[in-house]
Image (cartoon, rainbow, N blue to C red):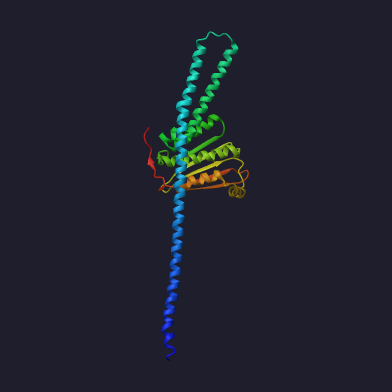
Amino acid sequence: MKTLDPLILITPVMLMLAVGIIVFVVLYQRRMLQHQEQLRQLQSVKQQQLLEATLHAQEEERRRVARDLHDEVGAMLALVRLNLHQMVSHTEARDEKLLRNTQHLKQQLDEVLSSVRRISHDLMPVVLEKMGLAQALDALRRTLAHSGQIELIISYNDKSKRFKPQHELLLYRMVQELLNNTIKHARATQVKIDLQFTPTETKLLYKDNGVGFDMATMQQEKALSGGLGIMSLQSRAALLNGSISFTSAPGGGTTASISIPTTSPELIPTQPT
């Protein structure tokens, strides 16, 4: 019995040590997982902050270029046109060819002025800042109708709702990106946009009648090339705590569905104009 006494004493100690080691390992692994999750969240927050800073810098640069185009280049071209008109009106020229050339030059200046205004509006639409997303989409529809590029049909359930300005701008840029893709690649003649406000979310449905594409092929190309256009749309949707999804088929057009929680971009009443 005396020889068993040390074993009887050591066994509980060994069991306690084993349990302690197991508990230590479990706690250590849990702490490591928590640490990894914290790092992942920090990286996610850092990436989101970096993306926000990048988009903010882009918008500030767009604003500066739009202002320079409108205030400087546009004003200079308008002055040149005015001087040309005055020069012709005060000249007793009977040369028909000279008059035709002058008239042609005035038409070219008008086209350049129109292009400068259009580019300035695309870079920073004043209507969006002053009147909100719905009115800005209407202005975009009129611009496209005038250019004859594509027919844009817009519907919404409430024009009185507005996002915070920065969120309206993000959603407007997403529509611009979708339209650019449609014009460049889809060979579409018509685009329909439906903007719906509900108590829980804001939904924007974008649908063109273009050639469409195979979703599986698009996913492969996105994986190989990085899919910068798709990534840009997804990044902007993520900044709104929302999502964007695509459906398409060859010959069946393309549909993009954007969903944004109402609690993310707080809705504000439309300011009177």
Q: Nearer the viewer, residue 11 or 231?
A: 11
x and y, in percent, of residue 238 in the image: 47, 48
Task: Look at 50% across and 28% down and name the residue there.
Answer: 116
In the figure, residue 212 lies in which quadrant? top right
Q: How many marks?
A: 0
Can you see residue 260? no
Residue furthest bottom in the image: 1
- State whether residue 57 is above or below residue 47: above
Residue 273's place in the image compared with 157, above or below, is: above
Question: Would you identify the image quadrant in which residue 71 lies?
Answer: top left
The percent coordinates of residue 268 (x first, y second) are 38, 41
Instruction: Work out which quarter of the rendered image holds the N terminus and state it.
Output: bottom left
Is residue 134 depicted above or below 10 in this figure? Answer: above
Q: Is residue 245 positioned above or below 10 on the image?
A: above
Left or right, 184 with reference to 167: right
Residue 190 position in % (x across, y down) = 56, 37
Q: Residue at x 52, y 22 (%)?
A: 110
Quadrant of the frame with the C terminus: top left
Nearer-the-camera pick, 20 or 146 = 20
Where does residue 209 sit, x and y in percent of width and height? 58, 40
Closest to the observer, 72 or 222: 72
Q: Is residue 29 visible?
A: yes
